[in-house]
Amino acid sequence: MVICLAVADDGCIDPRWGRAQRVVIATVEAGTITGWEEFDVSWDALHDTGSEGAHHARVARFLREHQADTVLAHHMGEGMARMLQKMGVTVRLGIVGDARRAVTTAAV
């Protein structure tokens, strides 16, 4: 399982999925985190630099490049959720708290 989530400086879920500054790609095998890589994506700064479709394409490219099959987020817009669903990405919303704990919980 490859999970993507927005993470804040304190190690908690960043509630701003589409406007995240940094995201994590976590690889989970048998309920254990086997990979944890953080990326400065600057979606916060890039969000309003073009159309909504261009921003969604940016997010989709990132997820495809990293083979993410699941996104954990506090919330996201309907358009983003619809796009991820069309990509076949599982979306789990309402996620708060410690990012590592959220990943291991989602992997169960």
Image: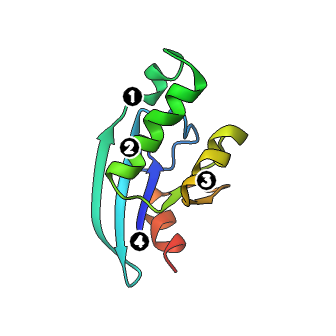
Q: What residue is shown at x 38% (from left), y 43% (from top)? A: 62
Residue at which label 3 appears: 86
* Relative to 103, residue 39 above or below: above
If you read the primary sequence from the N terminus, does the residue marked by circle 4 or circle 2 appear first? Answer: 4
Q: What residue is shown at x 45% (from left), y 21% (from top)? A: 46
Between the C-alphas of marks 1 and 4, the distance is 24 Å
On the image, the x and y values in percent for residue 84 come to 58, 50
Of badges 1 and 4, the one in the foreground is: 4
Residue at which label 1 appears: 42
On the image, the x and y values in percent for residue 20 come to 48, 35
If you read the primary sequence from the N terminus, does the residue marked by circle 3 or circle 2 appear first? Answer: 2
Of badges 1 and 3, the one in the foreground is: 3
If you read the primary sequence from the N terminus, does the residue marked by circle 1 or circle 2 appear first? Answer: 1
- Mark 1 residue type: Ser
Residue at which label 4 appears: 1
* Relative to 28, residue 53 above or below: above
Q: Secondary structure at mark 1?
A: loop
Question: Quarter holding the N terminus?
Answer: bottom left
Q: What residue is shown at x 46% (from left), y 63% (from top)? A: 69
If you read the primary sequence from the N terminus, does the residue marked by circle 1 or circle 3 appear first? Answer: 1
Q: Secondary structure at mark 2?
A: helix
Q: Are marks 4 and 3 in contact (CB under 8 Å)?
A: no
